[in-house]
Amino acid sequence: PPTAVHHPIRSFHNKAQSSIPYSRRFNQANTSMSSPQAPISLFRSLLREAKKVDNYNFRHYAIRRTRAGFAANREMTGNEAVVALNEGQEQL
C-alpha cells in the first residue's frame, strides 16, 4: 500500500482554510456586488490587474484610469452604483 506523502504547501493551505469558518468561505453574500465592501474589493482587484501589465505606459494608464473612475463616482449610490459595480466587474 502507498504511504501518505507530506506536502508542506498543501498542509499549510488546509490549515489556513480551516481557520476560516465554512460559512464565511463560501457565503454568497461575501461575493455579491451589493455588499459595502464590494467597491473596495473591485478597486483593489482592478489595481492588482493593472499592475500586472508589462508595458509601462499601459500599466500607468490603467492605474490612473482606475483611480480617476473611482474618484469621479465616489458619491454614487443606489441602483446606479450597482450597475457601475457590475460593469467594473465585467472589465476584470
Image: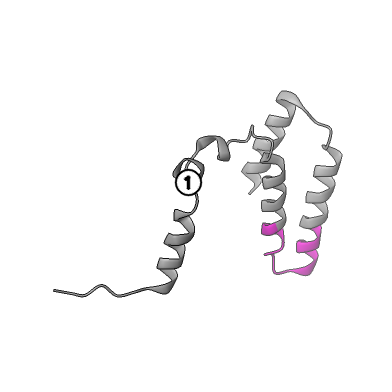
Nearer the observer, 14 or 39:
14
Residue 69 pos. (x, y %): 81, 44
Residue 92 x, y percent position in the rendering: 63, 49
Closer to us: 5 or 70? 5
State left or right for residue 39 relative to residue 5. Answer: right
Q: Is residue 91 above or below residue 9?
A: above
Residue at the image point whose x is 72% and y is 48% from the top: 43
Above-or-below relation of 75 to 50: above
Q: Nearer the viewer, residue 88 or 22?
A: 22
Quarter of the picture containing the N terminus is bottom left
Residue stretch in magenta: 48-61
Residue 7 picture quarter: bottom left
Give the residue drawn at x 55%, y 35%.
29
Q: Is residue 75 left or right of residue 31?
A: right
Please tell me in which quadrant of the rendered image residue 61 appears.
bottom right
Q: Which residue is mark 1?
A: 21
